[in-house]
Amino acid sequence: MDKVGFLAANAAQAAMQRQENIANNLANINTSGFRAQVVALRSTPLVALNERGQARLDTRTFSTETVTGFDARPGVMQQTGRELDLAVKTPGWFAVQRADGSEGYTRAGAFVLNEDGILSTPEGFPVLGEGGVIEIPQGSRMLVSETGLVSAVSTDPANRAVQEVGQLRLVNPNPTNLERGTDGFFQLKQGEAPQAAEVRVLSGYLEGSNVSPAESMVEMIAAQRMFDMSMKAVMMTKESDQKADNVLQAG
């Protein structure tokens, strides 16, 4: 097959990978705090060496599918009235403790209290405060201020004591320094982010996904058209090769 056929087949494969990434975004349209993946088809020049070992650029290029980052735009705030539901209403992130003990960052604030009274994600990862995990005493309900100060209020009608139990660890790193980990949490490419005093929290709210169904469907259609065009080029190349073979055999 001619090089054109190989390039077209590679472009078709990249278009399929693009569709997979878009489908992943659409599948998380109802996931709280989800940040859409930003994907792009990128041309990759072919580098070859001449007889003296020097690099030169070939005239043809391959297309590769690349995840260039994530969409940092906020999602829509949805009121739930549930005290353990929290949303970051400014740029910023909640910090959680991952399975390996490192910090992960998330905008998903549908938190729960585990059997030990520790504030956690639904998957069981502890939510971090400035001094470690946040623990709510038994027989208390949690209140969170706009600045992330966590208090425990006694449910005993005879004693409505309020006790401060910690300060949520809220960070606001530059989005360009963040990457999505394999567990779905975001992380800094290097180090850990400092506490950010400017981050503000809403109690009784959840932030929705920032995936736009309309934009994603348009991208999906464009990727499908690119795949179809690439496959037509592959078939045309195959037909040309067959005609050339027939001419050679006839001669």
Image (tube, rainbow, N blue to C red):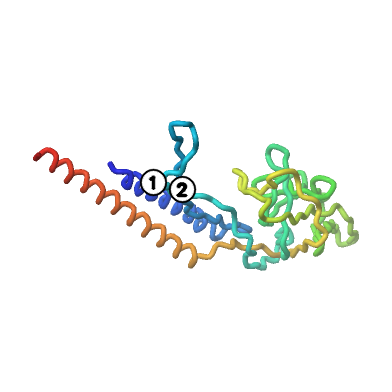
Label 1: how many Cα within 10 Å (few below 14, some 14–19, many 20+): many
**Are the residues tagged 1 and 2 within 8 Å (C-beta)?**
yes
Amino acid under disc 2 = Thr
The residue carrying mark 1 is 10
Q: Compare residues 120 and 1 and report the one nearer the observer.
A: 1
* The residue positioned farthest toward the top in the image shown: 52
The residues tagged by marks 1 and 2 sit, at their Cα atoms, a distance apart of: 8 Å
Q: Compare residues 120 and 174 and report the one nearer the observer.
A: 174
Amino acid under disc 1 = Asn
Give residue 165's position: percent from left, percent from top: 86, 52
**Above or below — where is 242 with respect to 230?**
above
Label 2: how many Cα within 10 Å (few below 14, some 14–19, many 20+): some
Position of 2 with respect to 198 (left or right) is: left
Secondary structure under badge 1?
helix
Q: Compare residues 86 and 235 and report the one nearer the observer.
A: 235
**Above or below — where is 41 with respect to 101?**
below
- The residue shown at (80%, 64%) is 146
Quick check: can you spot residue 122?
Answer: no
Res. 64 mark: 2
Give residue 63's position: percent from left, percent from top: 43, 49
Quick check: can you spot residue 116?
Answer: yes
Give residue 1's position: percent from left, percent from top: 28, 41
- The residue shown at (46%, 35%) is 49
**Above or below — where is 7 with respect to 219?**
above
Res. 236 mark: none
